[in-house]
Amino acid sequence: QLEILSGLQGLFGVPELSAPEGFRIAQESALRTADLLVERACALPPGPRTVLIFDELSDSLCRVADLADFVKIAHPEPAFREAAEEACRSIGTAVEKLNTNVELYQSLQKLLADQTLVDSLDPETRRVAELFMFDFEISGIHLDKEKRKRAVDLNVKILDLSNAFLMGTHFPNKVEKRLLPEHIHQNFTVSGNHVIIDGLHAEAPDDLVREAAYKIFLYPNAGQLKCLEELLSSRDLLAKLVGYPTYSHRALQGTIAKNPETVMQFLEKLSDKLSERTIKDFEMIRGMKMKLNPQNSELMPWDPPYYSGVIRPQSPYNIEPSLYCPFFSLGACMEGLNVLFTKLLGLTLYAEQPARGEVWCEDVRKLAVVHESEGLLGYIYCDFFQRADKPHQDCHFTIRGGRLKEDGDYQLPVVVLMLNLPHPSRNLPTLLTPGMMENLFHEMGHAMHSMLGRTRYQHVTGTRCPTDFAEVPSILMEYFANDYRVVNQFARHYQTGQSLPKNMVSRLCESKKVCAAADMQLQVFYATLDQIYHGKHPLRASTTDILRDTQEKFYGLPYVPNTAWQLRFSHLVGYGAKYYSYLMSRAVASMVWKECFQQDPFNRAAGERYRREMLAHGGGKEPMLMVQGMLQKCPSIDDFVSALVSDLDPDFETFLMDSE
């Protein structure tokens, strides 16, 4: 009653969440609903209803967990963050219990074991049933009692090791002051007799600073090494226990790549195709080092990030970000997205006034996504501005997944986009650098994936799809953001209204290609290392020996003795055996751009096909089938590799235009 009087709403319009205590109410109600649904699932004869109940079960828990996942890192108030963290823990525990609930498992297993029933399911229902099954099996629920206990223990152990390893990847190293030349001390934190080194200082102009940081920050820590070895061997044991030859085989189930052999083939072919270009990049970087540091011109792993940054402004494509910012005010960029989505998909973004208490910070904007004939499709909350305690990562969160409800209505998706843009001031709007503008488009690609998904089940809503497909819609948006025809629709000087000149857009695109082959080669090296670590065990050598060999073969710059970069490779936790995904997604996005949008970036028919074939299915359809539907052919690994490599080649039109 009080709530109604004060007009205070809860976060995201969830009535309970007008105060931190509401999380407890929400989580308890979700857990009660879950208990009822479990009973229903177990009592029901196997059939398509089984899958529906599983999805409702998943939805009731995810609606609290997903929201809490976001609030625990983004809410400015500690009380809200702590309450959300507690909700995450209690829902997490409930999910673990469900994944080991034998009776629940059997209700799904009976369905999938009955071939006549399986054949009667539509493809999406069948895929969702298999995905739920897959979650069960990693808990070893299909095994005998003793093995099941081992699987549960391994899962707990892997979680603990993952957290420990992640902590260790950021942990600084320290060295006695007297061991470092006096004149570089001021580049680091000095504490008593020690110098503390907390990162690679890759952008430092002094070669000696980068060398010292590289050798000290990457000096192997015995505890962290043991942690990594145990993490990799525990993952391998778990995979074998639940029936896979390696962890990588398990991680790649259901992806575009499907199996580790395909991933390795993709990486090896890409490496071969890149090698000439990478050598050229390294020669260019070596030349620059020679010029700036003649007495010590051998190229070392700590050089490329710095020198490629020096080369870029001196190339014919010098771009000074501050010359671009006035053309990219936040208002102009949002209008650009609006124009693009209207032309391609018939959508408009409308700003709505959020109710009191609906948002966690007064500068959060709420956008309604409305289709010209279908009406409201969902909501995007834009948390775009910098604030203390906010994570620096630009990201997209699903707060509520779309699904078809029992009453035939569609549960509308709700997402948050988080960026870190400067605040506007009285006489200056928020101006974006070209990089920020591209990030805005990238994140908006994820949001559209969520908004346009029309899956029957929330378990596969929007971006809940295989990792190597998840970045396709977002990377595709980068191609739009770098196309003059698109940029010309919105880039206007905030004071004069002047359009951004065409040659400035071209130079921006070309400047991104400077040293891009060497950058991509580095990603190939990381992805290969990740595959080998999660491949056949016991590993043929120590993780450091494997690093050395892989670096020499897939990167080409010498390994530095007494370093162990893999101990800082934090993505091994979140992207174990899947680090290749970004490259694969970029390849698909590149092909989609070239085949469908390059000729006309506003082509409505191509936009509708993109929605129908790719965005609408979320993770409810096999990813390669979505790619095929879009490209109207089945791409080969060679096609993927060619698409990535051809993006690196200079565009002669720009070259000619600039020399006129």
Image (cartoon, grey):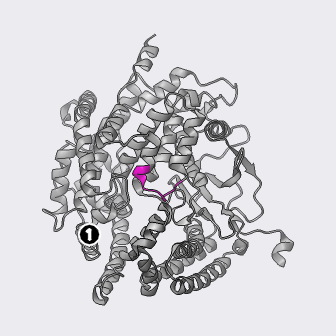
Q: Which quadrant holds residue 229?
A: bottom left
Residue drawn 73% across the image and 49% down it: 351
Type of residue at label 1? Tyr
Q: Nearer the viewer, residue 425 or 275?
A: 275
Is 658 placed left or right of 351 in the picture?
left
Q: Is residue 254 above or below residue 164?
A: above
Residue reaching furthest to the top: 660
Check disc 1 and report its element: helix, strand or loop.
loop
Residue 618 belongs to magenta span: yes
Quadrant in the picture for the N terminus: bottom right
- Name the spot of residue 282 as percent of width and height, x first: 25, 34
What secondary structure is the stretch in magenta mostly built from? loop
Q: Which residue is mark 1?
A: 244
- Name the spot of residue 509 as percent of width and height, x first: 45, 29
Please give the range of residues in magenta.
617-625
Q: Which quadrant holds residue 555?
A: top left
- Name the spot of residue 585 as percent of width and height, x first: 40, 47
